[in-house]
Amino acid sequence: MATMRARHGVLVVDFRYHNIRCREKTNLTDTPANRKTLAKIIEKMEAEITLGIFDYGAYFPKSDKIEQMKQLDDRVEACVSRKPIFKDFSKTWFEEKQVEWQPAYQQKIQIILDNYLIPFFGQKTLPNIKKSDLLDFRSSLAKVRYGKDNQTSLSVARINQIMIPLRMILQEGSDRYEFDTPFKGIKNLKEQKPDVHPFTLDEVWIFLNHVRHDYKPYYTTRFFTGMRSSEIDGLKWECVDFDRREIKVRSAIVDGIEGPTKTYGSNREIAMSQLVYDALQEQKRYTFGKSDYVFCNSQGKPLEHRNVNRRVWTPTLKLLGLKHRRAYQTRHTAATLWLAAGENPEWIARQMGHSSTEMLFRVYSRYVPDMTRQDGSAIDSLLLASKQLAQEQVKQRINDNKDE
Protein backbone atom coordinates (compact mmCIF):
# COMPACT_ATOMS: atom_id res chain seq x y z
CA MET A 1 0.00 0.00 0.00
CA ALA A 2 1.33 3.46 -0.91
CA THR A 3 2.12 5.97 1.82
CA MET A 4 3.14 9.60 1.93
CA ARG A 5 5.68 11.38 4.04
CA ALA A 6 7.43 14.70 4.13
CA ARG A 7 11.05 15.29 3.29
CA HIS A 8 12.58 18.75 3.54
CA GLY A 9 9.08 20.22 3.49
CA VAL A 10 8.05 18.38 0.28
CA LEU A 11 5.66 15.43 0.10
CA VAL A 12 7.09 12.10 -1.07
CA VAL A 13 5.15 9.04 -2.27
CA ASP A 14 6.46 5.69 -1.06
CA PHE A 15 5.05 2.68 -2.94
CA ARG A 16 5.91 -0.59 -4.69
CA TYR A 17 5.63 -1.19 -8.43
CA HIS A 18 6.72 -4.41 -10.14
CA ASN A 19 7.81 -5.47 -6.67
CA ILE A 20 10.33 -2.62 -6.56
CA ARG A 21 10.24 -0.02 -3.80
CA CYS A 22 9.78 3.43 -5.29
CA ARG A 23 10.10 6.75 -3.53
CA GLU A 24 9.20 9.73 -5.65
CA LYS A 25 9.13 13.42 -4.82
CA THR A 26 6.09 15.49 -5.70
CA ASN A 27 5.88 19.21 -6.33
CA LEU A 28 3.55 19.58 -3.33
CA THR A 29 4.66 21.23 -0.11
CA ASP A 30 3.69 19.61 3.18
CA THR A 31 0.36 21.24 4.03
CA PRO A 32 -2.93 19.68 5.18
CA ALA A 33 -4.61 20.65 1.89
CA ASN A 34 -1.82 19.13 -0.18
CA ARG A 35 -1.91 15.93 1.87
CA LYS A 36 -5.61 15.54 1.04
CA THR A 37 -4.86 16.16 -2.65
CA LEU A 38 -2.02 13.64 -2.66
CA ALA A 39 -4.17 11.05 -0.86
CA LYS A 40 -6.64 11.15 -3.76
CA ILE A 41 -3.79 10.84 -6.29
CA ILE A 42 -2.39 7.84 -4.41
CA GLU A 43 -5.80 6.20 -4.38
CA LYS A 44 -6.00 6.59 -8.18
CA MET A 45 -2.45 5.27 -8.60
CA GLU A 46 -3.22 2.14 -6.62
CA ALA A 47 -6.34 1.49 -8.69
CA GLU A 48 -4.41 1.83 -11.96
CA ILE A 49 -1.61 -0.43 -10.68
CA THR A 50 -4.21 -3.06 -9.80
CA LEU A 51 -5.83 -2.78 -13.26
CA GLY A 52 -2.47 -2.88 -15.01
CA ILE A 53 -2.86 0.52 -16.66
CA PHE A 54 -0.46 2.53 -14.51
CA ASP A 55 1.80 4.92 -16.44
CA TYR A 56 4.84 5.67 -14.32
CA GLY A 57 6.04 8.56 -16.47
CA ALA A 58 2.67 10.30 -16.39
CA TYR A 59 2.80 10.60 -12.60
CA PHE A 60 6.53 11.16 -12.20
CA PRO A 61 7.86 12.67 -15.47
CA LYS A 62 11.22 13.63 -13.94
CA SER A 63 11.94 10.24 -12.39
CA ASP A 64 15.08 8.34 -13.30
CA LYS A 65 13.11 5.09 -13.08
CA ILE A 66 10.86 5.75 -16.08
CA GLU A 67 12.86 3.72 -18.63
CA GLN A 68 13.29 0.82 -16.20
CA MET A 69 9.56 0.72 -15.50
CA LYS A 70 8.72 0.91 -19.23
CA GLN A 71 10.84 -2.16 -19.86
CA LEU A 72 9.15 -4.02 -17.00
CA ASP A 73 5.73 -2.98 -18.33
CA ASP A 74 6.65 -4.37 -21.77
CA ARG A 75 7.80 -7.66 -20.27
CA VAL A 76 4.60 -8.07 -18.31
CA GLU A 77 2.49 -7.26 -21.36
CA ALA A 78 4.45 -9.73 -23.45
CA CYS A 79 3.75 -12.47 -20.91
CA VAL A 80 0.07 -11.59 -20.66
CA SER A 81 -0.62 -11.09 -24.36
CA ARG A 82 1.90 -13.72 -25.54
CA LYS A 83 3.19 -11.19 -28.03
CA PRO A 84 6.97 -11.43 -28.42
CA ILE A 85 9.34 -8.70 -27.43
CA PHE A 86 11.52 -7.24 -30.17
CA LYS A 87 14.75 -8.80 -28.90
CA ASP A 88 13.37 -12.34 -29.00
CA PHE A 89 11.53 -11.99 -32.30
CA SER A 90 14.49 -10.35 -34.07
CA LYS A 91 16.65 -13.32 -33.06
CA THR A 92 14.09 -15.75 -34.54
CA TRP A 93 13.80 -13.62 -37.68
CA PHE A 94 17.58 -13.51 -38.14
CA GLU A 95 17.94 -17.27 -37.77
CA GLU A 96 15.23 -17.84 -40.38
CA LYS A 97 16.58 -15.31 -42.87
CA GLN A 98 20.34 -15.86 -42.71
CA VAL A 99 20.15 -18.92 -44.98
CA GLU A 100 19.15 -16.50 -47.77
CA TRP A 101 22.14 -14.19 -47.24
CA GLN A 102 25.81 -14.25 -48.01
CA PRO A 103 28.11 -14.45 -44.96
CA ALA A 104 29.22 -10.81 -45.27
CA TYR A 105 25.60 -9.60 -45.35
CA GLN A 106 24.74 -11.76 -42.34
CA GLN A 107 27.54 -10.04 -40.47
CA LYS A 108 26.28 -6.58 -41.45
CA ILE A 109 22.74 -7.33 -40.25
CA GLN A 110 24.04 -8.76 -36.97
CA ILE A 111 25.99 -5.54 -36.37
CA ILE A 112 22.87 -3.46 -37.00
CA LEU A 113 20.83 -5.60 -34.60
CA ASP A 114 23.45 -5.56 -31.84
CA ASN A 115 24.51 -1.92 -32.10
CA TYR A 116 21.29 -0.13 -32.98
CA LEU A 117 17.99 -2.01 -33.06
CA ILE A 118 18.09 -4.18 -29.93
CA PRO A 119 19.45 -1.42 -27.63
CA PHE A 120 16.53 0.82 -28.66
CA PHE A 121 13.62 -1.60 -29.20
CA GLY A 122 14.81 -4.73 -27.38
CA GLN A 123 12.24 -4.90 -24.54
CA LYS A 124 9.28 -3.49 -26.46
CA THR A 125 6.50 -5.83 -27.58
CA LEU A 126 6.11 -5.75 -31.35
CA PRO A 127 2.51 -4.40 -31.44
CA ASN A 128 3.50 -1.60 -29.04
CA ILE A 129 6.11 -0.16 -31.39
CA LYS A 130 4.47 2.90 -32.88
CA LYS A 131 5.28 5.16 -35.79
CA SER A 132 6.45 7.83 -33.35
CA ASP A 133 8.96 5.33 -31.91
CA LEU A 134 10.39 4.71 -35.37
CA LEU A 135 10.72 8.43 -36.08
CA ASP A 136 12.35 9.02 -32.68
CA PHE A 137 14.79 6.19 -33.38
CA ARG A 138 15.69 7.50 -36.84
CA SER A 139 16.13 10.99 -35.41
CA SER A 140 18.48 9.64 -32.75
CA LEU A 141 20.66 8.07 -35.46
CA ALA A 142 21.11 11.46 -37.12
CA LYS A 143 22.35 13.17 -33.96
CA VAL A 144 26.01 14.06 -33.68
CA ARG A 145 28.10 11.61 -31.70
CA TYR A 146 31.32 12.60 -30.02
CA GLY A 147 34.24 10.28 -30.63
CA LYS A 148 37.76 10.25 -29.24
CA ASP A 149 39.08 12.83 -31.67
CA ASN A 150 36.12 14.66 -33.14
CA GLN A 151 32.38 14.66 -33.57
CA THR A 152 30.75 12.43 -36.12
CA SER A 153 27.26 11.52 -37.24
CA LEU A 154 25.81 8.69 -39.30
CA SER A 155 25.36 9.36 -43.00
CA VAL A 156 21.94 9.33 -44.62
CA ALA A 157 22.90 6.17 -46.49
CA ARG A 158 23.88 4.43 -43.25
CA ILE A 159 20.64 5.47 -41.53
CA ASN A 160 18.62 4.03 -44.43
CA GLN A 161 20.63 0.79 -44.21
CA ILE A 162 19.80 0.50 -40.49
CA MET A 163 16.10 1.10 -41.12
CA ILE A 164 15.87 -1.69 -43.73
CA PRO A 165 16.11 -4.70 -41.34
CA LEU A 166 13.87 -2.87 -38.85
CA ARG A 167 11.21 -2.55 -41.55
CA MET A 168 11.60 -6.23 -42.46
CA ILE A 169 11.30 -7.39 -38.84
CA LEU A 170 8.17 -5.36 -38.16
CA GLN A 171 6.58 -6.41 -41.45
CA GLU A 172 7.17 -10.08 -40.64
CA GLY A 173 5.86 -9.53 -37.12
CA SER A 174 2.71 -7.82 -38.40
CA ASP A 175 2.03 -10.76 -40.73
CA ARG A 176 2.43 -13.35 -37.97
CA TYR A 177 0.70 -11.56 -35.12
CA GLU A 178 -1.88 -9.59 -37.10
CA PHE A 179 -1.14 -5.99 -36.24
CA ASP A 180 -0.63 -3.04 -38.56
CA THR A 181 3.00 -2.32 -39.29
CA PRO A 182 3.98 1.13 -37.96
CA PHE A 183 6.17 1.72 -41.00
CA LYS A 184 3.26 2.93 -43.12
CA GLY A 185 4.08 6.34 -44.57
CA ILE A 186 7.75 6.26 -43.54
CA LYS A 187 10.00 6.54 -46.59
CA ASN A 188 13.76 6.36 -46.89
CA LEU A 189 15.64 9.57 -46.31
CA LYS A 190 16.66 11.18 -49.57
CA GLU A 191 20.27 10.37 -50.38
CA GLN A 192 22.62 12.39 -52.52
CA LYS A 193 23.82 10.52 -55.58
CA PRO A 194 27.27 9.04 -54.94
CA ASP A 195 30.08 10.98 -56.53
CA VAL A 196 31.68 9.33 -59.53
CA HIS A 197 35.15 10.66 -60.32
CA PRO A 198 36.79 8.47 -62.97
CA PHE A 199 40.40 9.00 -63.95
CA THR A 200 41.26 10.50 -67.29
CA LEU A 201 43.35 8.29 -69.54
CA ASP A 202 46.37 10.54 -68.93
CA GLU A 203 45.94 10.11 -65.17
CA VAL A 204 45.73 6.34 -65.57
CA TRP A 205 49.07 6.24 -67.40
CA ILE A 206 50.70 8.56 -64.88
CA PHE A 207 49.56 6.32 -62.04
CA LEU A 208 50.58 3.03 -63.68
CA ASN A 209 53.98 4.40 -64.67
CA HIS A 210 54.79 5.43 -61.10
CA VAL A 211 53.09 2.87 -58.85
CA ARG A 212 55.24 0.24 -57.13
CA HIS A 213 56.36 -2.26 -59.77
CA ASP A 214 54.98 -5.27 -57.87
CA TYR A 215 51.53 -3.65 -57.82
CA LYS A 216 51.43 -2.54 -61.46
CA PRO A 217 49.71 -5.76 -62.68
CA TYR A 218 47.15 -5.41 -59.88
CA TYR A 219 46.18 -1.84 -60.77
CA THR A 220 46.37 -2.47 -64.51
CA THR A 221 43.77 -5.21 -64.01
CA ARG A 222 41.63 -2.92 -61.87
CA PHE A 223 41.71 0.02 -64.29
CA PHE A 224 40.95 -1.99 -67.44
CA THR A 225 38.47 -4.66 -66.27
CA GLY A 226 36.08 -2.73 -64.01
CA MET A 227 36.23 -5.44 -61.35
CA ARG A 228 34.92 -4.60 -57.88
CA SER A 229 37.39 -4.57 -54.98
CA SER A 230 35.80 -7.68 -53.50
CA GLU A 231 35.99 -9.47 -56.86
CA ILE A 232 39.66 -8.79 -57.51
CA ASP A 233 40.48 -9.74 -53.90
CA GLY A 234 38.81 -13.10 -54.51
CA LEU A 235 40.16 -13.74 -58.03
CA LYS A 236 41.77 -17.18 -58.34
CA TRP A 237 44.05 -18.54 -61.03
CA GLU A 238 41.49 -21.20 -61.92
CA CYS A 239 39.26 -18.35 -63.14
CA VAL A 240 41.90 -16.86 -65.45
CA ASP A 241 41.66 -18.39 -68.93
CA PHE A 242 44.60 -17.21 -71.06
CA ASP A 243 43.55 -19.34 -74.04
CA ARG A 244 40.12 -17.70 -74.26
CA ARG A 245 41.48 -14.42 -72.89
CA GLU A 246 38.77 -14.29 -70.25
CA ILE A 247 38.50 -13.63 -66.53
CA LYS A 248 35.68 -15.57 -64.90
CA VAL A 249 34.17 -13.69 -61.95
CA ARG A 250 32.75 -16.33 -59.63
CA SER A 251 33.54 -15.28 -56.06
CA ALA A 252 34.22 -12.27 -53.87
CA ILE A 253 35.86 -11.55 -50.52
CA VAL A 254 34.05 -9.11 -48.22
CA ASP A 255 35.47 -8.28 -44.78
CA GLY A 256 37.81 -11.25 -45.04
CA ILE A 257 35.00 -13.72 -45.81
CA GLU A 258 34.95 -15.47 -49.19
CA GLY A 259 31.55 -16.05 -50.72
CA PRO A 260 29.46 -15.62 -53.87
CA THR A 261 29.53 -12.42 -55.90
CA LYS A 262 27.32 -9.45 -55.03
CA THR A 263 24.40 -10.57 -57.23
CA TYR A 264 23.63 -13.46 -59.55
CA GLY A 265 24.29 -11.15 -62.50
CA SER A 266 27.76 -10.39 -61.15
CA ASN A 267 28.90 -13.85 -62.25
CA ARG A 268 30.34 -13.06 -65.65
CA GLU A 269 33.23 -13.37 -68.08
CA ILE A 270 35.40 -10.31 -68.61
CA ALA A 271 37.34 -10.06 -71.85
CA MET A 272 41.07 -9.45 -71.41
CA SER A 273 42.48 -6.55 -73.35
CA GLN A 274 46.09 -6.92 -74.42
CA LEU A 275 47.18 -4.75 -71.49
CA VAL A 276 45.35 -6.97 -68.99
CA TYR A 277 46.62 -10.13 -70.68
CA ASP A 278 50.23 -8.92 -70.39
CA ALA A 279 49.71 -7.78 -66.79
CA LEU A 280 48.33 -11.16 -65.72
CA GLN A 281 51.11 -12.99 -67.54
CA GLU A 282 53.59 -10.93 -65.54
CA GLN A 283 51.67 -11.62 -62.31
CA LYS A 284 51.72 -15.34 -63.10
CA ARG A 285 55.48 -15.36 -62.60
CA TYR A 286 55.03 -14.13 -59.01
CA THR A 287 52.09 -16.05 -57.58
CA PHE A 288 51.05 -18.92 -59.88
CA GLY A 289 51.75 -22.24 -58.11
CA LYS A 290 52.39 -20.44 -54.83
CA SER A 291 48.79 -19.47 -54.12
CA ASP A 292 45.27 -20.12 -55.42
CA TYR A 293 44.81 -16.35 -55.56
CA VAL A 294 46.09 -14.19 -58.39
CA PHE A 295 46.91 -11.27 -56.11
CA CYS A 296 48.15 -12.33 -52.70
CA ASN A 297 50.55 -11.46 -49.90
CA SER A 298 53.83 -13.21 -49.06
CA GLN A 299 51.90 -15.91 -47.16
CA GLY A 300 49.76 -16.71 -50.19
CA LYS A 301 46.63 -15.22 -48.65
CA PRO A 302 44.43 -12.89 -50.73
CA LEU A 303 45.18 -9.18 -50.63
CA GLU A 304 43.05 -7.06 -48.32
CA HIS A 305 42.18 -3.95 -50.33
CA ARG A 306 41.92 -1.64 -47.31
CA ASN A 307 45.49 -2.47 -46.40
CA VAL A 308 46.61 -2.02 -50.02
CA ASN A 309 44.82 1.33 -50.17
CA ARG A 310 46.64 2.52 -47.07
CA ARG A 311 50.11 1.32 -48.11
CA VAL A 312 50.06 1.81 -51.89
CA TRP A 313 47.02 3.56 -53.37
CA THR A 314 46.79 6.68 -51.21
CA PRO A 315 50.56 7.36 -50.98
CA THR A 316 50.91 7.04 -54.78
CA LEU A 317 48.11 9.51 -55.46
CA LYS A 318 49.62 11.92 -52.97
CA LEU A 319 53.10 11.57 -54.48
CA LEU A 320 51.81 12.29 -57.99
CA GLY A 321 49.60 15.19 -56.92
CA LEU A 322 46.49 13.43 -58.21
CA LYS A 323 43.11 14.13 -56.63
CA HIS A 324 42.37 11.61 -53.90
CA ARG A 325 39.73 9.07 -54.88
CA ARG A 326 38.55 5.74 -53.53
CA ALA A 327 40.17 2.81 -55.32
CA TYR A 328 36.63 1.83 -56.39
CA GLN A 329 36.93 4.67 -58.94
CA THR A 330 39.02 2.29 -61.05
CA ARG A 331 35.74 0.50 -61.83
CA HIS A 332 34.14 3.76 -62.90
CA THR A 333 37.22 4.56 -64.98
CA ALA A 334 36.94 1.31 -66.92
CA ALA A 335 33.31 2.05 -67.78
CA THR A 336 34.00 5.58 -69.02
CA LEU A 337 37.02 4.48 -71.06
CA TRP A 338 34.97 1.77 -72.77
CA LEU A 339 32.20 4.25 -73.54
CA ALA A 340 34.67 6.83 -74.80
CA ALA A 341 36.23 4.22 -77.08
CA GLY A 342 32.83 3.54 -78.65
CA GLU A 343 32.35 0.00 -77.35
CA ASN A 344 28.86 -1.49 -77.55
CA PRO A 345 26.93 -0.40 -74.39
CA GLU A 346 25.38 -3.86 -73.99
CA TRP A 347 28.86 -5.42 -74.07
CA ILE A 348 30.07 -2.90 -71.46
CA ALA A 349 27.10 -3.69 -69.20
CA ARG A 350 27.98 -7.39 -69.35
CA GLN A 351 31.61 -6.66 -68.51
CA MET A 352 30.49 -4.62 -65.48
CA GLY A 353 27.99 -7.22 -64.30
CA HIS A 354 24.95 -4.99 -64.88
CA SER A 355 21.68 -6.58 -65.93
CA SER A 356 20.94 -3.79 -68.42
CA THR A 357 22.41 -0.63 -69.91
CA GLU A 358 20.13 1.61 -67.82
CA MET A 359 22.59 2.07 -64.96
CA LEU A 360 25.44 2.41 -67.39
CA PHE A 361 23.98 5.47 -69.08
CA ARG A 362 22.55 6.94 -65.87
CA VAL A 363 25.86 6.82 -64.01
CA TYR A 364 28.63 7.04 -66.59
CA SER A 365 27.53 8.57 -69.88
CA ARG A 366 27.88 12.16 -68.66
CA TYR A 367 31.63 11.60 -68.36
CA VAL A 368 32.14 10.53 -71.95
CA PRO A 369 32.36 14.09 -73.35
CA ASP A 370 35.08 14.90 -70.81
CA MET A 371 37.02 11.83 -71.96
CA THR A 372 36.72 12.48 -75.70
CA ARG A 373 36.61 16.30 -75.74
CA GLN A 374 34.00 15.98 -78.52
CA ASP A 375 30.76 16.89 -76.79
CA GLY A 376 28.26 17.62 -79.58
CA SER A 377 30.90 17.56 -82.30
CA ALA A 378 29.67 14.32 -83.84
CA ILE A 379 26.39 15.86 -85.00
CA ASP A 380 28.26 19.01 -86.09
CA SER A 381 30.55 16.89 -88.27
CA LEU A 382 27.60 15.06 -89.77
CA LEU A 383 25.72 18.27 -90.61
CA LEU A 384 28.84 19.93 -92.02
CA ALA A 385 29.63 16.93 -94.22
CA SER A 386 26.03 16.81 -95.43
CA LYS A 387 26.07 20.53 -96.18
CA GLN A 388 29.31 20.25 -98.15
CA LEU A 389 27.93 17.31 -100.13
CA ALA A 390 24.76 19.26 -100.94
CA GLN A 391 26.81 22.26 -102.10
CA GLU A 392 28.93 20.06 -104.34
CA GLN A 393 25.80 18.49 -105.83
CA VAL A 394 24.36 21.95 -106.55
CA LYS A 395 27.60 23.01 -108.24
CA GLN A 396 27.63 19.85 -110.31
CA ARG A 397 24.04 20.47 -111.49
CA ILE A 398 24.92 24.05 -112.46
CA ASN A 399 27.93 22.83 -114.44
CA ASP A 400 25.81 20.14 -116.09
CA ASN A 401 23.24 22.76 -117.11
CA LYS A 402 25.95 25.00 -118.58
CA ASP A 403 27.30 22.12 -120.65
CA GLU A 404 23.86 21.50 -122.06
Image (cartoon, rainbow, N blue to C red):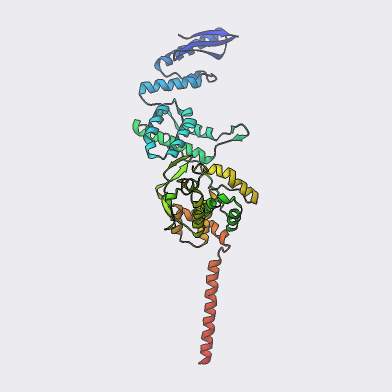
Position of residue 144 relative to residue 367, above or below, is above
Determine if residue 188 is in view.
Answer: yes
The quadrant in which the N terminus is found is top left
Image point (48%, 20%), residue name: 68
Q: Where is residue 363 in the image (x, y as percent from the top left)?
A: 50, 53
Q: Position of residue 210 (x, y in %)?
A: 61, 53
Q: To which quarter of the image does residue 5 belong?
A: top right
The residue that appears at 46% across and 59% down in the rendered structure is 345
Viewer-closest of 285 and 347: 285
Residue pictured at 44% horizontal, 18% vertical:
54
Tell me which residue sits at (52%, 92%) in the image.
403
The image shows a total of numbered marks equal to 0
Would you say residue 248 is visible in this rendering?
Answer: no
- The x, y position of residue 99, in whole percent, is 37, 37
Q: Where is residue 226 in the image (x, y as percent from the top left)?
A: 49, 53
**Extreme-bottom residue of the structure:** 404
Q: Nearer the viewer, residue 77 or 96?
A: 96
Q: Which of 371/136 is in front?
A: 371
Image quadrant in which you'd find residue 166 = top left
Of residues 287 and 9, the one nearer the viewer is: 287
- As displayed, is residue 32 above or below residue 326? above
Instruction: Answer left or right for 378 relative to 98.
Output: right
Position of 300 with respect to 171 (left or right) is right
